[in-house]
Image: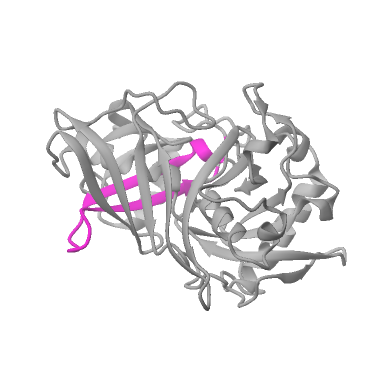
Amino acid sequence: MPSTRIPACFMRGGSSKGVFFTADDLPAAHALWDPLFLSVIGSPDPYERQLNGMGGGVSSLSKAAVISASLREEADLDFTFAQVSVAKALVDYSSNCGNLSSAVAPFALERGLIRRDDGPASVRIFNTNTNKMLIAQLEVSEGRAVESGAFAIPGVAGTGSPIRLDFLDPAGAGTGRLLPSGNLKDLIEAEDGRVFEASLIDVGNPCVFLDAGAFGRSGNETIRDLESDTALTILLEDLRRKAAVLMGLADEESAAPAAVPKIAFVGTPLSAKDLAGKAIDPAAADLAVRMLSMENVHRVLPLTGAMCTAVASRIPGTVPAGLARKSDGDVRLANPSGILPIGTDVSLDGAPTVRSVSVTRTARLLMTGEVVVPA
């Protein structure tokens, strides 16, 4: 039986990469998507290299996206995100990817799903994973997204044309509530009996925030230091799953989704070096963050996780707010690849309300053609 060839684009969006498809090029039955995405990305791979597919061996490089022209009056495009596990035969649709969101409009222009006149353009995108809207603002030339420019983002070599993303009303994306448990802080008991204070926040994606000091950490550690600590990794996954129950994402019998909630250490920024060996100036950051995604320490920050962190740091009484420096303007998050600024529009009149979260990314088309799925 011959292999199947499917039109696709391989794209970088922010600090992630993924394989992009139009919905019309995929099987109508969504049940067939999982084995297709697993084959294309190269999972499951016990060696965690994904050499037999398009993935890159870590969660930020193991992704797929499905785009279509939207039938909704308020949107131009519909975007479905698929997080593909590296080592397991698992595709998770429970969350959005903020980084890949920056490549949605460029892909749609490339494939003719939308058209825009040359110059500044605005594209309204509906994310089906979270039922939330975002607006991408980018520059268009000759009908395609402009890629070259002088804007740099942490974790990505070189520069590109800025793409501004405004995530509208992003609270409750996964649980329906900004504070899923109703509390600014909760106590979570680990299997070994230790109790940890955590803030459970849902903006962009549900996240669990812990004071790094409670684990003898600072939140400024290297990825190797954290991932080599097997006991710590097991403990964090235990706490993440228990937090999922408190957030209503799972119950005692069902397993928590693999991609959410994400879990993070936060702490006061200290002198450190990024993955490129450059110094991170602690005075230029408001909060240090180390976040896990699919049981890997993220090389930058998942963008939705960064959004959630920034908003949490603006809400008095949360773990991040208690550790973050108070500053005007963007919230500056120190992470393994540098400092990521996030804009927040949060009202503290009465119950906290998140109007929007803004961030600027770059994107690039890496390949267009066909992916081959073996029979």
Quadrant that contains the N terminus: top left
Residue 28 seen: yes
Nearest the eye: 297 or 62 = 297
Nearest the eye: 98 or 7 = 98
- At 27% from the left and 48% from the top, the residue drawn is 67
Residue 259 seen: no
Q: Vertical placement of 339 versus 201: above or below?
A: above
Left or right of 306 on screen, residue 33? left
- At 62% from the left and 22% from the top, the residue drawn is 276
Q: Vertical placement of 159 versus 40: above or below?
A: above
Q: Position of residue 183 (x, y in %)?
A: 65, 75
Task: Give yes or no for residue 356 being in the magenta stretch.
Answer: no
For residue 259, what is the image quadrant? Answer: bottom right
- Display coloring: one colour
Quadrant that contains the C terminus: top left
Q: Position of residue 372 (x, y in %)?
A: 33, 31
Task: Give yes or no for residue 69 being in the magenta stretch.
Answer: yes
Which residue reaches farthest front? Answer: 328
Nearest the eye: 43 or 105 = 105
- At 60% from the left and 48% from the top, the residue drawn is 293
Magenta span covers which residues?
Answer: 58-85
Count of labels shown? 0
Q: Position of residue 5 (x, y in %)?
A: 27, 33
- At 70% from the left and 50% from the top, the residue drawn is 266
Q: Position of residue 78 (x, y in %)?
A: 27, 54
Q: Vertical placement of 240 versus 223: above or below?
A: below
